[in-house]
Image (cartoon, rainbow, N blue to C red):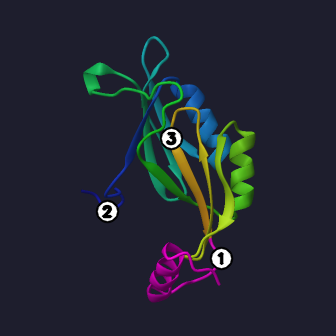
Amino acid sequence: MAEFEPTLVVSLTVDNGSEALDFYAKAFDAVELYRITAPDGSIGQAEFVLGNSHVYLSEGDPAWHAKALGDGEKAPCMFALWVENCDDAFQKALEAGAEPLMEPQDQFWGMRTGMVKDKYGYRWNLRHTFEEVPLEEIIKRAKALMNGETE
């Protein structure tokens, strides 16, 4: 493997690849690297970058064992996306057409997070760090939360 290749790249399967690429650019400032279109205009393969992470995208194709999620479905996985400001990123995603799942809020582990779902069924946890919390303190806070204790 070449030095510049990431160890893991996520591949999203959607129904309308061109629309999805536009959405990710508007919602998350994704930078498209390329797209390969089939004669019918569908996206066979595309790649975009979010920060320093690469993401592949294609439309469903049984030959490649790729199926897009159905309307209203949510992927069983979630993507955590580091952003400069969670609240601003959350609002920008909503303006691009994302559905709000969790309003931005401070978390005990030192991050401010908010969650949106794109129209393709993928959940995005937008986050930024507001406090550096040592692991021992995170565990202590988690145990307190699970025991119903508040500060």
Q: Is residue 6 above or below residue 93?
A: below
Residue 122: image tag: 3
Quick check: is 140 in the magenta stretch? yes
Label 3 Cα crowd, 10 Å radius (few <14 / some 14-19 / many 20+): many
Q: Is residue 95 above or below residue 61?
A: below
Label 2 Cα crowd, 10 Å radius (few <14 / some 14-19 / many 20+): few
The quadrant holding residue 59 is top left
Q: Which residues are magenta?
A: 129-151
Question: Depth check: 125 or 101 in front?
Answer: 101
Q: Is residue 85 above or below residue 12?
A: below
Which of the two marks, 1 or 2, is nearer to us in this view? Answer: 1
Q: Which residue is mark 1?
A: 130
C-alpha span from label 3 to label 1: 25 Å
Question: Residue visible at 60% across and 63% down?
Answer: 127
Tell whether 88 sits left or right of 56.
right
Please, what secondary structure does the residue beneath circle 2 have? loop
Question: Depth check: 112 or 66 in front?
Answer: 112
